[in-house]
């Protein structure tokens, strides 16, 4: 069972357009244990209404070095009816922090054993992360 712990959003002004950029930090617990974190970022007046994000899975229960963490950068957008999730390459990730562990490119991520956990978490994002859902639904309206 996955549970998401929601932090307050971090709001800033987009350097490229003066729009409002929202950055979200979430902690994911699996069966009561620290399991993953994810970040999301979106800007209100960009023509490309997609959310960029990264999920880092690994030894979040310890304070040790993040050698057993892997990160999976992705995008979420909507078509007429459904949320779409696409993995992206490391270079496209606005987050490159060492604490995220190794950031995988799309082709590496798709072959990784943990990819099912990544999509399990994205299922929860589009069902439960209200700020992200509201942004995506706006773009669809
Ligand atoms: Zn901008």
Image: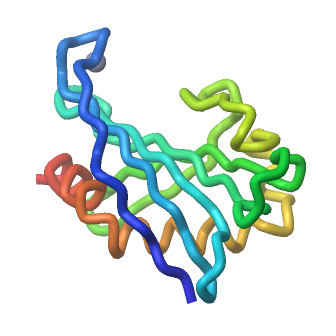
Write down which quadrant ligand 1 falls in: top left
The picture places residue 123, in percent across and down from the top left corner, at 48, 73
Report the residue that reaches farthest toward the front. 63
Number of marks drawn = 0
**Whether residue 79 is situated above or below residue 124 in the rendered picture:** above
The picture places residue 84, in percent across and down from the top left corner, at 45, 59
Q: Residue at 37% x, 67% y: name it.
A: 126
Q: Nearer the viewer, residue 53 or 2?
A: 2
The picture places residue 16, in percent across and down from the top left corner, at 30, 10
Report the residue that reaches farthest toward the top. 16
**Does residue 104 appear in this view?**
no
Quarter of the image where the N terminus is located: bottom right
Q: Residue at 42% x, 68% y: name it.
A: 5
Q: Residue at 45% x, 72% y: name it.
A: 4
Report the residue that reaches farthest toward the left. 141
Q: Is residue 53 left or right of residue 112?
A: left
**Does residue 101 appear in this view?**
yes
Q: Is residue 69 left or right of residue 96?
A: right
Q: Is residue 88 left or right of residue 136?
A: right
The picture places residue 32, in percent across and down from the top left corner, at 59, 85
**Whether residue 15 is situated above or below residue 62 in the rendered picture:** above
Q: Nearer the viewer, residue 82 or 8?
A: 8
Q: Is residue 65 left or right of residue 39?
A: right
Q: How is the image coloured?
A: rainbow
Q: Residue at 60% x, 69% y: name it.
A: 119
């Amino acid at each position: 069972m996955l549970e998401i712990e929601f932090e307050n959003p971090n709001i800033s002004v987009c350097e490229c357009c003066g729009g409002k950029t929202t950055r979200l930090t979430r902690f994911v617990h699996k069966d009561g244990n620290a399991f993953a974190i994810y970040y999301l970022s979106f800007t209100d007046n960009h023509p490309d209404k997609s959310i960029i994000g990264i999920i880092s899975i690994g030894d979040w229960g310890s304070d040790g070095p993040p050698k057993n963490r892997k990160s999976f950068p992705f995008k979420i957008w909507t078509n007429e009816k459904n949320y779409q999730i696409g993995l992206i390459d490391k270079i496209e990730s606005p987050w490159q922090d060492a604490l995220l562990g190794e950031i995988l490119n799309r082709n590496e991520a798709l072959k990784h054993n943990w990819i099912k956990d990544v999509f399990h978490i994205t299922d929860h994002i589009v069902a439960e992360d209200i700020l992200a859902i509201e942004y995506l639904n706006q773009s669809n309206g």
